[in-house]
Image: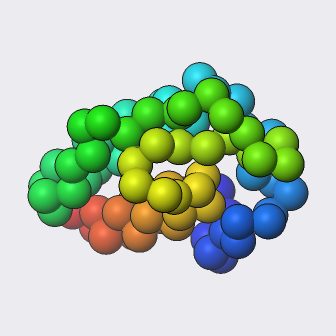
């Protein structure tokens, strides 16, 4: 995983499939529990913009999800 923040226009984001993004959302739910980060309604909504999947939890992008997961992974690395 890229440790640098993803930008919404990163071409790498176009390679993610719906099952991969769904797995990332599951990871967000699991890792976020201990920090009170819960988005039970978050899901891949099936729509795309310029080849990038959209995620329904507020108005966010896959880049935001990946950046949040990176922070959670870093925050729990030594625990």
Residue farthest toward the bottom in the current orientation of the protein:
4
Measured along the vertical axis of the image, is residue 18 above or below residue 21? above
Looking at the picture, tell me which residue is in the foreground, 22 or 47: 47
**Looking at the figure, which quarter contains the N terminus?**
bottom right
Residue at 61% in and 44% down = 54
Looking at the picture, tell me which residue is in the foreground, 51 or 72: 51
**Looking at the figure, which quarter contains the C terminus?**
bottom left
Percent across and percent down for residue 44 are 53, 33
Indicate the colouring scheme: rainbow
Classify residue 64 as left or right of residue 9.
left
Residue at 85% in and 48% down = 50
Classify residue 40 as left or right of residue 11.
left
Measured along the vertical axis of the image, is residue 40 above or below residue 66? above
Residue at 83% in and 42% down = 51
Measured along the vertical axis of the image, is residue 37 above or below residue 78? above
Q: How many marks are shown on the rendered structure?
A: 0
Measured along the vertical axis of the image, is residue 35 above or below residue 12? below
Percent across and percent down for residue 52 are 75, 45
Classify residue 40 as left or right of residue 77.
left
Residue 27 occupies quadrant: top left
Residue at 62% in and 75% down = 5
Is residue 14 in view from this perspective? no
Residue 75 occupies quadrant: bottom left
Is residue 22 in view from this perspective? yes
């Amino acid at each position: 995983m890229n440790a640098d923040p993803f930008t919404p226009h990163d071409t790498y984001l176009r390679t993610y499939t719906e099952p991969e993004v769904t797995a990332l959302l599951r990871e967000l739910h699991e890792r976020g529990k201990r920090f009170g980060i819960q988005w039970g309604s978050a899901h891949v909504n099936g729509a795309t913009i310029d080849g990038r999947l959209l995620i329904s939890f507020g108005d966010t992008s896959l880049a935001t999800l990946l950046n949040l997961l990176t922070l959670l992974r870093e925050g729990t690395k030594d625990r």
